[in-house]
Image (spheres, rainbow, N blue to C red):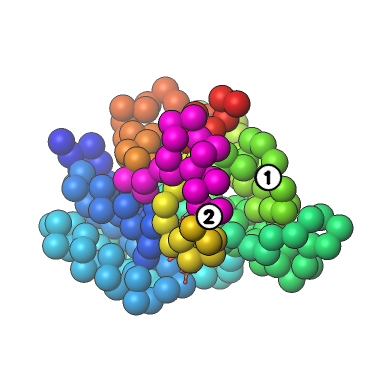
Amino acid sequence: MSLLKDKTAIVTGAGSGIGESIALLFAENGTRLVLTDVDEEGGQRVLQAVKDKGAEAIFVKADSGSAEDNERIVGEAQKAFADVHIAVNNAGIGGAQAPVGEYPIESWDKVIGVNLSGVFYGMRYQIPAMQKAGGGAIVNIASILGQVGFEQSSAYVAAKHGVVGLTKNAALEYSSKGIRVNAIGPGFIKTPLLDENLPQEQLNQLAGLHPIGRLGKPEEVAELVLWLASEKASFVCGSYYPVDGGYLSR
Ligand code: NAP
């Protein structure tokens, strides 16, 4: 089934993990893709993979934490494909682990800059482009940590709570203008973000926090993003959907 046929979608942080899975699933659903990432190698690899699936696509090396780069991404998308209909603001980082009273200021600024300001910068330029296109859909990748706290992770938790609030505000402002904005909250998902930063023992502990008894897979997150981006979700806006193996049920 081609749920996103003839649509153009921007996916940030598409060179790895959840963004990569979203890009591949979108490609299978007929989408033209504008992939962005700071990681040129990962971005080029995923670009080739979506082209192999038959998608028209470009890669734009860009820092989601920069307003100028977000403006440039939308400009490149319009240059290549005229209109932008869908955006998935996915790029994100983990940050330092420390209690609030010891949290490194530099890491706070970086995490808020990419994980929260990055989503605002994205929508700041995506929304006018979608208005020009006659409407669209935005999916912001928050986290279960956009609903609850997690020790040693204040910057990440604050940024992801901010993404949920920002999503609601954008939905209030643009739903009547044909742009649906939603956020999703993945539980802990097995991607390089976790694998490269945490020892196996901690990964096992994290898996145990999910009633389903395991970590999630990036493909399982991509399925929800596809649905929210598609016309199947035509009456869904301003919402937050967990995809978390039951984590938030505790
Ligand atoms: P990932 O595997 O590390 O992929 C993220 C990609 O984004 C990487 O290619 C990364 O490049 C890139 N990136 C980092 N900073 C960027 C920036 N400033 N501008 C553009 N691209 C940037 O991480 P993931 O697990 O797929 O996470 C994707 C999103 O899901 C994030 O927003 C994350 O917070 C969220 N999330 C993840 C989990 C989880 O458990 N994995 C759970 C809930 C929510 P580098 O590799 O070079 O840094």
Which labelled disc corresponds to residue 150?
1
Label 2, residues with CA under 10 Å away: few <14, some 14-19, many ≥20: few
Label 1, residues with CA under 10 Å away: few <14, some 14-19, many ≥20: few
Q: Does the residue labelled 1 lie within 8 Å of ligand 1?
A: no
Question: Looking at the picture, how far across and down is residue 231, in whole percent?
Answer: 31, 31
The answer to which of 115 and 5 lies nearer the viewer is 115
Position of 10 relative to 205 (above/below): below
Question: Looking at the picture, how far across and down is residue 193, in whole percent?
Answer: 49, 60
Q: Residue furthest right?
A: 101
**Amino acid type, mark 1:** Phe
Secondary structure of the residue carrying tag 2 is helix
Q: Residue furthest bottom?
A: 41
Q: Give the range drawn in magenta.
A: 202-219
The answer to which of 26 and 218 lies nearer the viewer is 218
**Amino acid type, mark 2:** Glu
The tag earlier along the polypeptide, 1 or 2, is: 1
Q: Could you tell whether 1 is left or right of 229 in the image?
A: left
Between disc 1 and disc 2, the foreground one is 2
Q: Residue at x 42, y 56 (%)?
A: 191
Which labelled disc corresponds to residue 201?
2
Q: Which residue is drawn at 36% across and 46% down?
A: 217
